[in-house]
Image (spheres, rainbow, N blue to C red):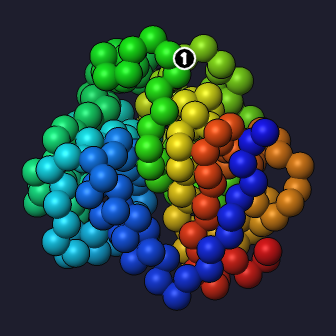
């Protein structure tokens, strides 16, 4: 039975997620980072908490096909906000510069090298939510939503700006995680939050509604503005 979302409304959702990051790091967990301005704030706040990051391993749930120092790179953002300031056990970067399909194949090889041939179970997987209810780089109606064999796919034409190809985790990999946390803030996301987590029937028009971990937990951390339509 898949997990139903637990809604957590916070005055400071980025701080709440920063605390989760620090706890996971202290336990030596496999942590999946996401892009976006609110996660960036969470990473900065996590860095300021002065945790022991030495046993944590970091992954990325999606990436834009740009060089790792590009202003649109999720890795570049996370590196500036957190990763360059700590010394974790490992950082597994999606190589966007390889292009969507070669980059996806490379990242799947990295996951297989770490976890073997079964379905990887990542410990803490962070996700943002787009105004179209997309997550990672899985956009409404995209064929990638139907992928059931691959762990990582290339997305040649994203559903919203910036219009550069992407690399993304697939739904089976997202739904295998032990703990999934959506971090969402702002009134402009309220409608998407309601579509994804407000009790409507899940469907490909709201990809985030399809993230329901089979054997893990699902928490949606929101500010009051993002929760306004729930």
Q: Nearer the viewer, residue 216 or 183?
A: 216
Q: Is residue 45 among what the camera can see?
A: yes
Judged from this view, the residue extending furthest toward the front is 27
> Is residue 186 shown above or below 115?
below
Taking the image as shown, residue 3 lies to the left or right of residue 177, namely: right
Judged from this view, the residue extending furthest toward the right is 201
> Within 10 angstroms of label 1, few (less than 14), some, or many (20 or more) residues?
some
Please tell me whether mark 1 sits on a helix, a strand or a loop. loop
Q: Residue at x 74, y 35 (%)?
A: 141
Q: Give the percent coordinates (x, y) of residue 57.
A: 26, 42
Q: Give the percent coordinates (x, y) of residue 56.
A: 25, 47
> Is residue 173 shown above or below 77?
above
Q: Nearer the viewer, residue 97 or 3?
A: 3
> Is residue 42 shown above or below 34?
below
Quadrant where the C terminus lies?
bottom right
**How many badges with numbers are in the image?**
1
Q: Quadrant of residue 109?
A: top left
> Is residue 206 shown above or below 186?
above
Taking the image as shown, residue 144 lies to the left or right of residue 96, namely: right
Q: Residue at x 16, y 71 (%)?
A: 50
Quadrant where the N terminus lies?
top right
Q: Residue at x 86, y 60 (%)?
A: 199
Q: Give the percent coordinates (x, y) of residue 75.
A: 27, 46
Q: Give the percent coordinates (x, y) of residue 196.
A: 75, 56
Q: Is residue 207 among what the camera can see?
A: no
Q: Which residue is mark 1?
A: 150
Q: Quadrant of residue 174?
A: top right
Q: Residue at x 44, y 44 (%)?
A: 123
């Amino acid at each position: 039975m898949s997990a139903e979302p637990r809604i957590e409304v916070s005055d400071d959702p980025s701080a709440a997620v920063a605390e989760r990051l620090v706890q996971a790091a202290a336990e030596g967990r496999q942590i999946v980072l996401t892009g976006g301005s609110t996660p960036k704030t969470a990473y900065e706040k996590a860095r300021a908490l002065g945790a022991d990051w030495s046993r944590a391993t970091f992954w990325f749930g999606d990436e834009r096909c740009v060089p790792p120092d590009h202003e649109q790179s999720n890795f570049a953002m996370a590196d500036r906000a957190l990763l360059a300031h700590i010394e974790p056990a490992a950082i597994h970067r999606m190589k966007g510069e390889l292009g969507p399909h070669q980059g996806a194949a490379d990242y799947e090889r990295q996951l297989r090298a770490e976890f073997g041939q079964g379905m990887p179970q990542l410990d803490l997987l962070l996700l943002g939510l787009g105004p179209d209810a997309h997550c990672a780089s899985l956009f409404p109606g995209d064929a990638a939503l139907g992928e059931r064999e691959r762990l990582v796919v290339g997305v040649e034409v994203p559903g919203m700006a910036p219009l550069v190809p992407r690399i993304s985790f697939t739904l089976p990999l997202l739904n295998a995680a032990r703990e999934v946390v959506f971090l969402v803030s702002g009134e402009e996301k309220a409608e998407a939050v309601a579509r994804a987590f407000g009790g409507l029937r899940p469907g490909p028009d709201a990809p985030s509604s399809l993230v329901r971990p089979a054997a893990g937990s699902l928490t949606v951390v929101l500010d009051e503005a993002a929760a306004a339509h729930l």
